[in-house]
Amino acid sequence: MAEITYREALKRALREEMQRDPTVVIWGEDVVAYAGGGAYGVTSGLAKEFPGRVRDTPIAEEAIIGVGIGAAMGGMRPVCEIMTVNFTLVAWDQIVNHAAKQSHMFNGQIKVPMVIRTPNGHGRTAATHSQNFDAWFAHVPGLKVVAPSTPYDAKGLLKTSIRDDDPVVFLEHLQLYGTRGEVPDEEYLIPIGVSDYKRRGKDVTLVTWGRMTMESLKAARVLAEEGVDVEIVDLRTLRPLDLSLALESVHKTNRVIVVEEGWRTAGLGAEIAASLQEMAFNDLDAPIARVAGLEVPMPYAKNLERATLPFAEDVVAAVHAMLQKQY
Amino acid sequence: MDKENLVALYRQMVLIRVFEDRAAEMYAKAKIAGFLHLYNGQEAVAVGAVSALHPDDDVVVNYRDHGWALARGSSARAVMAELFGRATGTTGGRGGSMHLVDVRNRFWGGYAIVGGHLPLAAGLAAAAQYLKTGRVTLCSMGDGSTNIGTFHAAMNWAKLWNLPIIFMVENNQYAMGTHYDVHSAVPMIQKAAGYNMYAEQVDGMDVMAVREAVCRAAERARRGEGPSFLDVVTYRYRGHSMADPDVQRDKAEIARWKERDPITRFATEVLLKRNLVTPKDLDDIQKSVEQEVEDAIEFADKSPEPALDTLYDYIYQQPVRNMQIAGSLIRPPTIAKSVPANGKHA
Ligand SMILES: Cc1ncc(C[n+]2csc(CCOP(=O)(O)OP(=O)(O)O)c2C)c(N)n1
Ligand SMILES: [Mg+2]
């Protein structure tokens, strides 16, 4: 088993699926020529390995998604890359009114086996380039939404997503591309819709996904030194939302904090908190708390950006607050 | 084209005309609800175009789709039942008038977001090119859809990748109540020039002219010469939809276009003139069509509403684990189906 980056894990998944199935292609902006392949390097080298199957496209997100949908209807399995999640807004009609609706509205006659890969993230890029729309995608019936936090999950889930017969929005993260983790050399798949414990503990349950899983793990190390033992549930899939492990964990810890990167109001944390209290109200020793991004368009200045986003210290503070308060 | 095929074109146009008139009547009787966009006046476009295609070419159109579905071989029964919202309709009552579909005929549907289906059509053509199926995609749209971003994105992409596709504008000169001169800065045919795309202007009130233009465009695509753009000039006799009182158009203008009626013209200028049929034959066709549509109405009216327990079917083609716990579904969708999704490939 080798330690590889999240970026490399994604590339291996793409390579293996392209070797396995000649109908898998990669279309997106700058996936071929720019910097050797991909604005963030995920597809680097693949165009050479698979001639004619990795293609640069015009900057027309509505067409990248729409052409992908049509190709999927026509018998292919396109993986469409949208450079960052911010630009999916241009293609929102294609994603919501077309990709997500084809199967149900046409009564099963049409299927759309496509993957939309796109990264969340920030990096001093200000308001239009530092956003998180996880909750928006997760809101839509007909989409499957995946948001892996580790190289292992990224590889296994991307392979499954490519083989899936429904449109999958695959949310990567700029801050995760360079992170490393163990990935087996042999093939494996991870099912969509199955959450995962990333740390076992007994005092407080953190329900999270994506980059915030990593921040939660950092927070857990700090808290462990203080003698606080948190359990971390990584949802991995945001639609359908698998709350079975979160529920199991709440039965044990009786305390939950939902940790998300996006805006708090009407965020996914609100949905998760509501569902957990519906199912486990009597198990709760404290109101369910949320850690989330502050509700402002992201500023450029270093200190303001840092203040807007949630990090490990915010998770630590939320755990402290929950444990100190008497109910 | 031999006599039998010419008469078949005529019968299809009459079928669409009668179907639409009766659908309007059913709308007035509240058997049909929502938006109902009728095809009266434009019959020659769908009938001529479909007659020029192979049975396994791909067809994608907008919400003014009854004529297309009928021309492409969906039964009047299934289409009427869909308008009634019944289980026996083309999508079992899911999509209604604007979203007819019949993938067995590679009729990929009516699409109701203006311009939304253009990239999909380019994608079908991209699949045909990549999988080397030899298929051509016919993508029809209204004149009002040639200003939205997806139009330009799809035109550019199709030319760039040399896709086997025909972009066909059913230029009835109005987008709802907005005249062409109010919504477009340049003449329609010039819109193709920006993409250096082969283009023709076609008389949309002449079924043979439409047929021949689509034949030429399809042959170009099959020879690997890429996309074509057809500006098919036509007119709709009724308002935009049954919700439109049609007060903004000049009555004299409507009357002028009716003088060029595609059905009457085809009867007098081709069928009767060449002695292919007698007036009595035409009467018989009219009667048989009226009977077919009457039967479709009876069928639709007798058909059951879709079963409530099918509500969640096909939200996903492939159910995943934990669907119930997710709360997004009360039970997993069924996957049994009579028609394989996306039809047969290769
Ligand atoms: C994106 C979008 N905007 C607005 C509408 C509302 N709308 C439906 S049809 C229509 C007019 C379209 O005209 P045209 O493309 O010429 O088609 P026609 O109805 O003449 O066949 C409008 C504005 C819509 N369905 N989609
Ligand atoms: Mg129009």
Image (cartoon, coloured by chain):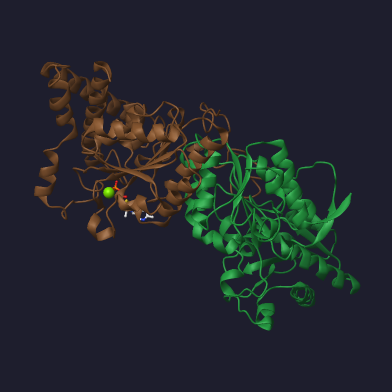
Chain colours: A green, B brown
Q: How many marks?
A: 0
- The location of residue B91, given as percent across then percent down, is 43, 35
B214 or A128, which lies in front?
A: B214
> Relative to A264, does residue A249 appear above or below in the rendering?
above
Q: Is residue B302 left or right of residue A186?
A: left
A69 or A19, which lies in front?
A: A19
Q: Quadrant of residue A44?
A: bottom right
Q: Is residue B243 left or right of residue B56?
A: left
Q: Is residue B35 left or right of residue B282?
A: right
- The location of residue A247, given as percent across then percent down, is 73, 55
The residue positioned farthest toward the left in the image shown: B252
Image point (27%, 23%), residue name: B295
B221 or A98, which lies in front?
A: B221
- The location of residue A112, given as percent across then percent down, is 55, 41
Image point (73%, 61%), residue name: A207
Q: Is residue B187 visible?
A: yes
Q: Quadrant of residue B111?
A: top left
Q: Quadrant of residue A316?
A: bottom right
Q: Is residue B84 visible?
A: no
Quadrant in which the C terminus of chain A is drawn: bottom right
- The location of residue B220, given as percent across then percent down, is 41, 35
A218 or B39, which lies in front?
A: B39
